[in-house]
Image (cartoon, rainbow, N blue to C red):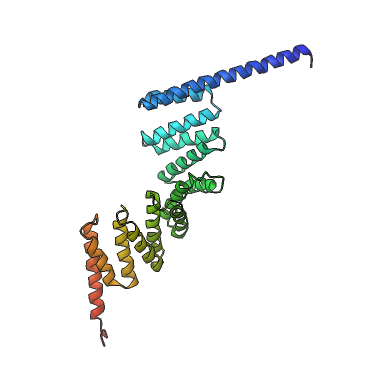
């Protein structure tokens, strides 16, 4: 290569580097203006600036962050999971490994679940759980995975994920919900002794939890299925005035009393 050719090549590379730097600076400026617009709830202005940032640097991590913010706006202010999912997918195309990529993946899985695509959501979540998932994201991933599996009727697999949430953060709102779900799913899976144990433990440990009324109701149903009708009636009697749907409690109490009366009236009883 001649010296002249070398100088031309060096100059070209320098010019390209300067142009790339200029694009990044323009993109960063648009991104900051978008953030400022969001602070003042100027949603239209924020969208305009995020799109300008993407246009200025279309194949960059900054574009990935801008697509993510657009997706969050679709979720938070537009209630449009379909549009949000599209932005999250574009975000992932521009992001490498890191916390923001994991956050985008979780939000995408959440929207896919809302859109009735549980298999796609589970594929993303299982991929996350098998990678170097940040510990701060683990309970959220486990909880969402458990919820999808529960809705799909895979109770025993869901139980495993709820137990992981419960072990990690037992006293948080999410942890309390997980403990309640463990007892409920054990009942649905016909593991009645475990359901009785875990629902009973839950209502004693968290008497004021928002999940406790439903836990007490299901504990009563579990005792009934175990054959202790009197115990079931006692629990239902204690919650009939506070349960959100009192009619359901009264109806179940009536059914149990009929069962008890029928059983005591059967031929051969007491002989």
Q: Residue at x 48, y 44 (%)?
A: 137
Give x and y (percent) for residue 56: 52, 21
Q: Which residue is drawn at 34% across and 66% down?
A: 222
Q: Could you tell me if residue 47 is visible in this image?
A: no
Instruction: Work out which quarter of the rendered image holds the N terminus and state it.
Output: top right
Give x and y (percent) for residue 173: 37, 49
Q: Is residue 44 placed above or below 80 in the rendered structure?
A: above
Give x and y (percent) for residue 7: 73, 13
Q: Is residue 173 placed above or below 89 in the rendered structure?
A: below
Q: Residue furthest bottom?
A: 271
Q: Could you tell me if residue 39 is visible in this image?
A: yes
Q: Which residue lies furthest to the top in this view?
A: 4
Give x and y (percent) for residue 38: 39, 27
Instruction: Work out which quarter of the rendered image holds the C terminus and state it.
Output: bottom left
Q: Nearer the viewer, residue 198 or 159?
A: 198
Task: Determine whether, in the image, residue 161 is placed left or right of residue 176.
Answer: right
Q: Which residue is drawn at 44% across and 58% down?
A: 159
Q: Image quadrant of residue 43?
A: top left
Q: Image quadrant of residue 14?
A: top right
Q: Image quadrant of residue 253?
A: bottom left
Q: Nearer the viewer, residue 174 or 95?
A: 174
Q: Is residue 136 placed above or below 90 in the rendered structure?
A: below
């Amino acid at each position: 290569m001649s010296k002249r050719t070398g100088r031309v090549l060096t100059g070209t590379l320098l010019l390209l580097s300067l142009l790339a730097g200029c694009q990044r600076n323009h993109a960063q400026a648009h991104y900051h203006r978008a953030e400022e617009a969001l602070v003042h709830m100027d949603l239209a202005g924020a969208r305009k600036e995020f799109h300008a940032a993407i246009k200025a640097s279309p194949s960059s991590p900054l574009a990935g962050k801008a697509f993510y913010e657009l997706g969050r706006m679709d979720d938070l202010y537009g209630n449009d999971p379909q549009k949000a999912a599209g932005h999250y997918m574009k975000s992932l195309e521009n992001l490498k490994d890191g916390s923001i990529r994991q956050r985008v993946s979780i939000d995408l899985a959440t929207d896919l679940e809302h859109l009735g695509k549980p298999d796609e959501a589970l594929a993303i979540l299982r991929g996350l759980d098998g990678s170097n998932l940040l510990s701060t994201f683990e309970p959220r991933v486990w909880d969402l995975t458990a919820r999808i599996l529960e809705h799909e009727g895979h109770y025993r697999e869901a139980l495993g994920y709820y137990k992981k949430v419960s072990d990690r953060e037992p006293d948080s709102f999410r942890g309390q919900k997980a403990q309640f779900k463990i007892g409920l799913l054990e009942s649905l899976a016909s593991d009645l002794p475990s359901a009785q144990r875990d629902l009973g433990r839950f209502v004693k440990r968290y008497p004021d939890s928002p999940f406790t009324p439903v836990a007490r109701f299901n504990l009563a149903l579990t005792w009934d299925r175990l054959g202790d009708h009197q115990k079931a009636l006692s629990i239902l009697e204690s919650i009939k005035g506070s349960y959100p749907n009192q009619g359901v409690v009264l109806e179940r109490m009536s059914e149990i009393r009929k069962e008890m009366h029928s059983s005591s009236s059967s031929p051969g009883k007491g002989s």
